[in-house]
Image: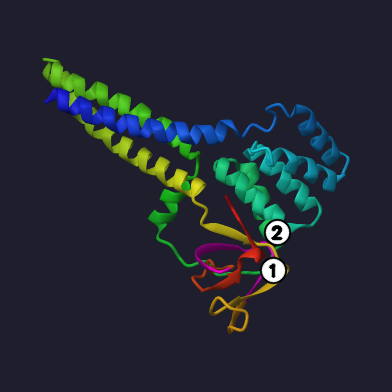
Amino acid sequence: MVKKIFILITALAATLSAVAQEDSVATVTAAPALGNEQIWDEANTAYVNANYPRAIELYHSIEDQGLASAKLYYNMGNAYFKTDDMGHAILYYNKALRLSPGDQDIRYNLDVANSYTKDRIQVVPELFLTRWIRSVRQTISGNAWAVLSLVFFAVMLVAVMAYMLVNSLLFRKIGFFATIVSFLLFVITTSFAVTERRHATSPTEAIVMRASVSVKAAPEKNSTDMFVLHEGTKVRVGNSVEGWIEVTIADGNKGWLEERTIEMID
């Protein structure tokens, strides 16, 4: 019995460890200064000197090398904000927040940038529990949740061993309750890790990049206009058909936009 439990838990840990390692790769390759310290410093100097177009150009040269990071995206968002390009500013603040969901500076700047957008969309009400769970899940990255889940797995393993092998009734009780608690925490943190990783690797949101764009009832130019969206508005994306993509806005309304009018948050 003990052997079966050990094998099962070990298999779960191995699976989760693989997820954590994959997520970690995305995070490790994100350091903007890996071999690009000179470009990074030059970009920051250009920003300080108010040469924002040059700073943006240099930041993009780092991004194009696959060295994306929350810090890089945050700086890009700031540079675009200074040029009054709210679409790109909001896009890169969102990208930064994907990599560092608990960063309050990023969240604050994103809120400021959003205050400049024209669309005032009434968000569909959510249950308090749903909002609370999401806010907790977004306090740290998916990689951090994966690490925490491995910690709770280790605690659970020790608790199981204590319950199965120790003769003392007191320690068996402690092991029993510790197993239950650590297992629940393991399940919760694993769920958070998987959800955050899915959001990070499977983009489902985009930002409108045009000053004004009509959302169509069907994926064709001659279709009926449903409503109008403006630069900086976030949409949730769905199906795509020959250069068109189905979008849903915060109030639940749906329609079709040409793919070239939006940029994905990935």
Q: Position of residue 17 (x, y in %)?
A: 39, 30
Q: Position of residue 191 (x, y in %)?
A: 36, 43
Above/below status of 125 relative to 90: below
Numbered label attached to residue 87: 2
Residue 255 is at least partly visible in this image: yes
Above/below status of 223 relative to 23: below
Above/below status of 261 relative to 36: below
**In the figure, residue 245 lies in which quadrant?**
bottom right
* Front of the two marks 1 and 2: 2
Picture residue at 72% right of the left edge, 42% below the top: 75
Q: Is residue 34 toward the left or the right of residue 182 in the image?
A: right
Picture residue at 45% right of the left edge, 31% below the top: 21
> Which of the marked residues, 1 or 2, is nearer the chain's N terminus?
2
Which residue position holds label 1? 118
Magenta residues span: 228-242
| Quadrant placement of the N terminus | top left
Q: Position of residue 181 (x, y in %)?
A: 26, 34
Q: Is residue 118 toward the left or the right of residue 133 in the image?
A: right
Residue 136 is at least partly visible in this image: no
SS assignment for the magenta stretch, majority: strand
In terms of depth relative to the viewer, which is nearer, 3 or 172?
Answer: 3
